[in-house]
Image: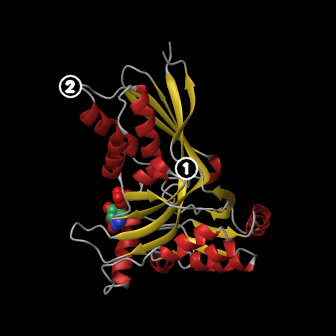
Amino acid sequence: MTRSLTVRAAAKINLHLGVGAPREDGFHPLDTVYQAVSLYDDLTAYAADDWSLTTAVAAHLGEVELPAAGDNIVDRVAELLCARRCDDGCRPTARVEVSKTIPVAGGMAGGSADAAAALVALDRLWDLRTPDSEMLALAAELGSDVPFSLIGGTARGVGRGELVTPTDDFGAWSWVVVPDDRGLSTPAVFRHFDALFPDASPEPAPAQPVLTALASGDPVALAAALHNDLEAAAVDLRPDLGDLLARGESEGALRGLVSGSGPTCVFLCESAEAARDVAASLASTRPVVLTAHGPVAGAHVVDTSPFP
Ligand code: C5P
């Protein structure tokens, strides 16, 4: 009997992204606040005799370049889980299908969402029963944003972003999301940050103003507190993003922000209705304009078909 399960994982927005000068290992110390928002990748894992992975990207995201076969973060999840949690000599076997609606190379942690979904799906499919603490440790090995993609909601991240703690969030936040068909490379944006700010403090800007605004539940307060230290670098590499941010705000958004390392731009709006209005205005000149709400759940099972 076929055994399969589908796991859904959400995109993230960094409501606060304080970036310090690079550490000795090359990573930048972060003080960040992540929020999971309602754009999702679904990953289905089927029991199979060998390993295969296929990825389908939603048509509206256009032609995007995906990692070569064997090079995807989902391949790395399978190898890591197998090496750490299976008996010696075992090899990963599953047929995995990923269906993406999170912008690719967009600064919304789409790859990290797939990694988190794969961790949950393969752990279940192979009946490994990995404890939560070990899932988070494996996630951190896979990428700085992967632990957050597992837990979702709203969380503060420190270290290189991998040390996550859920935080109070008393709002229901409405976003407009504008992806861009030319992705930006995260390492390139961090390198450009270093070039623009050679005297950056080793201490990242603290997240407290955003944490206070989240606890107030007030969109005007959150709009005033949003902060992204990578925005200057992303906009310097792609000046058109600056024009888009200004335009969204002139169309009625409370605040526009580059998402993480970009190039996706997000706009916080007063309400879901206001977000629909801003999205409709921006859609007159942009091919893809989405709305989303947050916070939403981390990687979770949405479907199983028959499990013993
Ligand atoms: O951890 P992850 O693999 O997602 O990071 C991708 C790249 O982004 C790193 O190789 C590094 O160049 C950059 N990065 C960084 N500092 C962080 C997180 C990521 O410089 N805190």
Report the disc number at residue 10. Answer: 1
Mark 2 CB near ligand 1 (8 Å cut): no
Q: Is residue 99 above or below residue 217?
A: above
Q: Quadrant of ligand 1?
A: bottom left
Q: Position of residue 166 (x, y in %)?
A: 48, 57
Q: Is residue 20 above or below residue 75?
A: below
View extreme (top): residue: 1
Q: Position of residue 60 (x, y in %)?
A: 65, 51
Report the disc number at residue 89. Answer: 2
Q: How many other residues sit within 10 Å of disc 2, few (<14), some (14-19) or many (≥20)?
A: few
Residue occupying the point 54% across, 33% down: 6
Residue occupying the point 43% across, 58% down: 165
- Depth-wise, is mark 2 or mark 1 nearer the camera? 1
Q: Position of residue 292 (x, y in %)?
A: 66, 57
Q: Marks 2/1: CA distance? A: 33 Å
Q: Position of residue 195 (x, y in %)?
A: 34, 82
Are the residues flagged by discs 2 and 1 in contact, CB closer than 8 Å? no
Q: How many other residues sit within 10 Å of disc 1, few (<14), some (14-19) or many (≥20)?
A: many
Q: Is residue 182 above or below residue 45?
A: below
Residue occupying the point 41% across, 48% down: 67
Q: Earlier in the sequence, mark 2 or mark 1?
A: 1
Taking depth in this image into account, of 286 and 10 the one nearest to the observer is: 10
Q: Is residue 280 left or right of residue 224?
A: right
Taking depth in this image into account, of 238 and 203 the one nearest to the observer is: 203
**Secondary structure of the residue carrying numbered label 2:** loop
Residue 30 in view: yes
